[in-house]
Image (cartoon, rainbow, N blue to C red):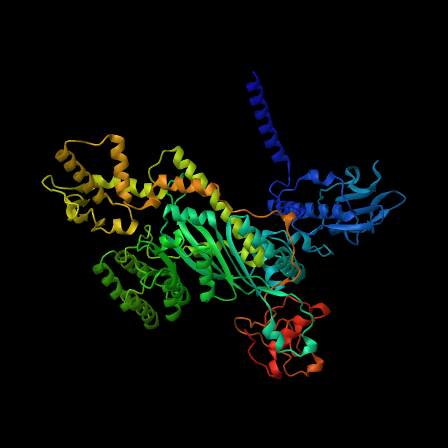
Amino acid sequence: MQANDDNENEDGAAEGLVDLGEANRYQGAPIHREEEFLNSKLVNSEKFDQSLLWEPFGTSKAAYATLELECFINKKVNGTFQLASGGNICRVVCRGDVGRIKWNKGLKKYQPISNGHDAHICSYRAHIRKIRPKDGHHHWTIDPKHTELKHNDWCRLGTRHCASNTTVRKRILKNLDTVRAFTYRKTRGREVMSSIQVNSKVKASSVHSKRAWKEGNGANPKVFRESFTRLGHLINWLRLRGNCAATVFWSDAEAELRRLPVDQRGDDGDIKYFVRYALCARGLRDFLAKAGVPYFSFDACHSYHLYYRGVFGNVVALVDTKVDAKDPTLTNCAFALSTDDSEHGGLYNLLFDVIKDGENESPLIEVMKKKSSVLISDDNPAFQRIARQELGNDRRFATCSWHMMNNAKKAGKGWDEKTLFWPYVGARTQFERDGHWEELRRVLPAGAFASLARQKEKEENNQVSWTLLKHIDAGMCMFGRQGSNNPVEQLHAKQLKDRGQNPLKFAYAWIEGCIEMEAVIIQAAQKLKDNEAILTPWANKQYQDAANAMVRVRIGEEVIIDPAEAAMVAEEWKPNEFIHYGVNLNKRMCGCGHWQHYGIACNHAIVVWEKYQEQLAERNGERMEADAYIKARAKFAVGDQPYFLAEVFIEAANALKANRIKLPCESTYVFDVNKYPPKPLPKTRLGRPAENRFVNAPAEATTRCGICHQRGHNQVTCAYYEVWFDWNDPNDRVFGNLFTNALNPNGNRARPPR
């Protein structure tokens, strides 16, 4: 009886938690950012919860901001106006009635100012008043008796007759997804405004748009500087308690300060400037090593933050997780991250170091050293040099085919012949490959063909491979991909919004992605276990397709199978028309090329294996049970590749459960006020410089630039990126001196020191 009561209590508690989750508006909100989370959710959901209007507010400003939010969600404009605002009361009317309405104190009602054609006014009203509750604390409420939030037919809001400005304010704009996604670092107010008006159908001004973009992305000097005071604590916590290999590097400006006069050096104390950091999720790294995943992708992307011009390096592996998909594909699993000031050897060297996590040889590095493992990059010499140091000089790399085509397009001045390029990349035989190459030679512009010819020469010399036939010759398992497109590019596209954040927030977003990926892997492992699967989803799909195609394959009864020799089979591809292929079981090769391309036996190989098993059974006088036979055939199809076996995947995922990455609680952060952003040295903007219209004006007649603090131009035409310090703040004087001296060392304009 007691047990039944306990079960009933547990069921009731579960129902109560569900109801509580539905009622809690802040479910999933970051700690100490509940209001920001709620506003963002409301702004982008296009549905306003009316119950928010009738709750007590701490200030009149908070009540008015809620009315402004409600009007934006319904009208997409700034439609509220404070007709009267005092110490105890605030009267709000429609912004379309500005200059046309007044409050009659005697009659205590709203009236039109004139009796002419402006006598008709909008019905929108709101009444905010101050009340004193029994506990003695003041608060503000929106009086529902004197509030009408509907606009009538006489409303002029948003029309050409509306005399007031209806552009949306910054506090609403900063919560738009469009604003947070607009992260290009050359952004001007007009560009953000145009993006908002086109994508969100919102009327906004350039000034409010730029301010909202900066605040929504944390792209202001104060937030940017304060983020680095927390970075050290995050890295230490991840390394010691967060199941993450993490390291961060800081430096001083000793060399730059020695170039300054003594009176300009200031009291720098223990100031440290950020250089780089690296992260590696230990749980995902160990999972990939135990599962034996052989496909790794390396590449770098630029930060789009207004003040940080660094580069982020990512490592991505391909994982088979889509159990319920009808046509499963492989999932990108990012497990290591590094950042530096540019894409050079240090960026990739740091990636390999954090993967090893202080060990001389890590299990994952051993997997990368295997001949069948694939390492893809975009033909970056810095990566290849570092990778050969770590993995051996004989290691062969795959190059992204899309980059080969893109480089040829640039050399060919806009050439775009994908219908010719991809058949050459995907050719499975030398005869087919030579035919497509001659067609490229005949059709392509000279510059485009010369670019591809240089890459082909490197491929023939076994330096890299970027076509399918060379991948097969190198023994690489390409998972059925045409060529070798770099999977990390897909990750960079998803990170586009996060790349507009500062390095601290970018690390947070990256870790949250790892947490989500860990959950996907564990869930997939549980489904594989429940289904009693033999192979992982993608591998099983390829295996089943090959098994279903066996009906078209013929093999002679007189054929004696020798695993070390090629056995001939015939496939009927048209009525009474056959194609013959040779299958070698020991070498795991078939003349069709499918086995080498996908890493999974084709229909020809399965037919030969079944014939061989029949001959073994006749020879030994013993046959396998049906279940054992099905399992043996599936394992033969994937060979000795553990990453296709469900039992290996499940075992590795079980180990991942106890080693998942974690983030620290916001309330536990320790701030180090001596940690600062990268050294305040000038960095030239990319692209064509803006025209300086004031070049002939005398220096004393022009304003001083807010970026480099020199005369003769402004921030728009300045050749340098924006700075994170304040030129007018005495506490930031040493930063300004460092910047100025880098512009003019010894009185001569020269290249900024590195």
Location of the N terminus by quadrant is top right
Q: Does residue 739 sit above or below 543 in this rendering?
A: below
**Would you say 109 lies left or right of 498 here?**
right
- Residue at 63% in and 58% down: 229
Residue at point 79%, 37% (across, down):
145
On screen, residue 301 versus residue 154, left or right, reads: left
Q: Residue furthest left?
A: 558
Q: Position of residue 185 (x, y in %)?
A: 57, 64
Q: Is residue 148 above or below residue 221?
A: above
Q: Dividing the image into 4 quarters, which one contains the C terminus?
A: bottom right
- Where 747 falls versus 638 (above or below)? below
Please identify the quarter of the rendering in which residue 456 is found.
bottom left
- Seen from the viewer's position, the closer of residues 509 and 563 is 563
Total marks in image: 0
Residue 735 in view: yes
Query: Residue 356, position in %: x, y?
Result: 44, 55
Q: Is residue 692 visible?
A: no
Q: Position of residue 610 (x, y in %)?
A: 19, 38
Side of 605 where 28 appears, left or right: right
